[in-house]
Image (tube, grey):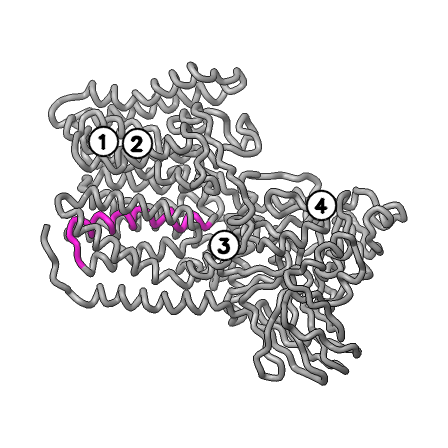
Amino acid sequence: MSDVRRRDLPVAAAGHLLLALVFFAPALLSGRILVPGDTLHAVYPWGAYLPQHPSHNSELNDVVQQFYPWFLVFRERLLSGELPLWNPDSALGLPLAANELTACWFPLSLLALLPATLGWNLLLVARLVLAGSGAFFLLTELGVRRLSSALGSVAWAYSLPFVLFLPMSIANVNALLPWLVAAAVRLARRPGPRRAAAFGVALALVHLGGQPEAALFGALTAALFGLLAAGPGVAHAFAWLLAGGVAGTLAAGVQLVPFLDYLSRSRALLEQGARFQPFPPTRLVTWVVPLFFGRPLDRSAWGETGFIDHAGFAGAIFLGAAGVALATNRRRRLVAPLLVVFSIVLLCYVLPPLPVLGKVRMQRLLPLAALGVVVLGALGLDRLSALRRKGAFALPAFALCWPLVVAVVVLVAVEAPPLALSRTAIPGLLRAAGLLATAAALLGVRRVDPRLRTASLAVVVLLDLWPASFDYHGASRKEDLYFQTGVTRFLGAQREAYRVLPLGYTMPPATNLPQRIPSILSYDALDDLEQSRFLRRMGGFYEGLFSTVDPSTVRNPRVLELANVRFLLDDPLGPRRDSPAERVRSGLDLRLVYDAPDGRLYELTTARPRAWASGTAEIDPGLRRFWPRLEAKDPRAASVPWVDAADAPAGGAGPASVQLESRTSGAMRLAVTAATAAWLLVAEGYDPGWRATVDGAKAPVYRANGAFCAVPLPAGAHNVILTYRPRSLQAGAALSILGVLLLAAGFLKDWPRRTA
């Protein structure tokens, strides 16, 4: 980068900081947190405290039910001095940091150490600044002029594929995409160890960002840009790209190795079928007019979903300018962004389902398409400036408007929109045409003060981008998020360790985490497959995302007893679950212990404790005898440990007692007294990462009763400690150290470079 560009980059970052503060000003100035918390108030127990159930944006349920709760859990773990390795309060307990979506190892996640409202808001602002300044860096590296680079950086940071997903971890990856591509281009043009190390650092951060599919496709895109920029020395450039990529991937081993280990046992890999469906081709019109099918915040024609999934809008102005670049510029630098956009259009809108991509939601690719449009558009803006200096005006004005013509023709020819859409479609088309004409005029008129032209173009670009996304995310008062209710106070007052089963759409998955209420529900498809199979034998689980439970089909009390489900939370307006008829149907012996407008709580009187011991056990390799007994609701399936082992001791026959002395997120200390050899069964989800010591000596941990942990004990009184320390984390940390050393060597050692 030249000295001019080094001076420009901090200015660009400062400009993007100002834009981000303006973009979120309604929330920041009122002291609110950028979470659409009113969606939480449409469910029990919180909805009972509101006369109405507003929902600012139902498309962002994931923020309330997944990403912000994980942020709070991560914050709590750090402040308590724990590593964020295990989440004991979702399902039967699940890995936390190994779930890459939590982005626990991403540097920006350390903002969680600040007060929650400030840290979360700064996280979203930082993502915008990182994205915008990275796009400016990339465009200047591609030789784009300063004005076009500045406008392009705004277009990328506020493109819908980026800004709509801003509260989710995929935004970490997308914010780094321009930096990764720029590092690849710089490395390909002048291969060497330092630039390879810079590329490796960018790739490591992308891997840590929290979205593996986006990271993979982002790395492929960066490699494409780099190799096409390499010129005749492509083999040499490829070697250095590979070296930097390997070192960067190793440096992210602390995330990647545990994630791959977890993925290998998850529903996402082993159970989910191909779910890819091409987007309707008519949705391409939203690349020019994003609100063509309505505005989600207005509850118009989009319906419950669609806008966030189909959003490819990077600005009608930049799409038009991309047409200018394609029509008037034959340079090699057009090939990479054009290939990216063309490939993604084919994958999303044209091609049938592909087995390789069947598990990847296509919305993960739209940010790459938006980045390609921005690069082409910035090159087109440069071309328009050159045409203006030559006195040409008609060509740029026509080229800017051609996408509108094509979009309208395609829409009318394939599928005419319903008349109900005219209130958003026609004004949207007219507005886009007006913005394109205004931009064409500003770019085409020769005698205009440059500073006035720059300011005017910036305003037009913002008017092009912001109406679709401004106020999309919403904001809440901190005290309105996961506030205490009668139900949560009742559950929080219970001293004995327990789990709760929310029925229907009460206390949706992960909304229990801020209150530290252990719920049997989980929201994520990365759940352990064996754990999911065990819980589904209870009946009632929705088969898609592992989330809500239909109370009318819950049928197996043995599953709930083993899972330490002591309370069932239900809708207060639903039928009673403790009636004799319901008891006969479900087999659950329930006692109503709380009945108020915010929910009903039933206690399962036969629930097993979180940890218990038995002098007898069934040694059952593969649990081949256990599963039929569990399905048959045999009481013995929940009264003794069924151990998945071939050579484990069977235990004795004497009594045993267990006291849970202390428990943190990833560790338990228990005092066990057994008259004879016994088995300790802990109702925590089995994972190979659990380690046990008995009186300081290592002891094996077995899978038992389908999804739990069991430890064999000799007769007598013992202190048992279980800790979660997966070997995959140790291996990943070792690889990270190796990768960091390789990257440091690249930065520190000025190895000889071969010139192409």
Q: Hey, which quadrant is residue 139 in on the image?
A: top left
Apparent side of residue 17 relative to residue 686 in the rendered image (left or right):
left
Given this view, does label 3 or label 1 mark the residue nearer the observer?
3
Whether residue 388 is visible to the viewer of this picture, yes or no, is: yes
Q: Secondary structure at mark 3?
A: helix
Q: Is residue 48 above or below residue 391?
A: below
Q: Residues within 10 Å of mark 1 (few under 14, many from 20)?
A: many
Q: Secondary structure at mark 2?
A: helix
Do the residues under discs 3 and 4 have CB atoms within 8 angstroms?
no
Looking at the image, is mark 2 or mark 4 earlier in the sequence? 2
Q: Amino acid at mark 2?
A: Phe
Q: Residues within 10 Å of mark 3 (few under 14, many from 20)?
A: many
Do the residues under discs 2 and 4 have CB atoms within 8 angstroms?
no
Whether residue 490 is visible to the viewer of this picture, yes or no, is: no
Q: Is residue 179 magenta?
A: yes
Q: Amino acid at mark 4?
A: Gly
Residue 488, x across and y down, in percent: 70, 57
Give the spatial CA distance, label 3 vs label 2: 39 Å
Looking at the rendered structure, the number of numbered marks drawn on it comes to 4
Q: Main secondary structure of the magenta part?
A: helix
Q: Nearer the viewer, residue 91 or 711?
A: 711
Q: Which residue is mark 4?
A: 540
Do the residues under discs 2 and 1 have CB atoms within 8 angstroms?
yes
Q: Which residue is mark 3?
A: 263
Looking at the image, is mark 4 or mark 1 earlier in the sequence? 1
Q: Which residue is mark 1?
A: 380
Q: Secondary structure at mark 1?
A: helix
Given this view, does label 4 or label 1 mark the residue nearer the observer?
4
Q: Which residue is mark 2?
A: 318
| Magenta span of residues | 169-192
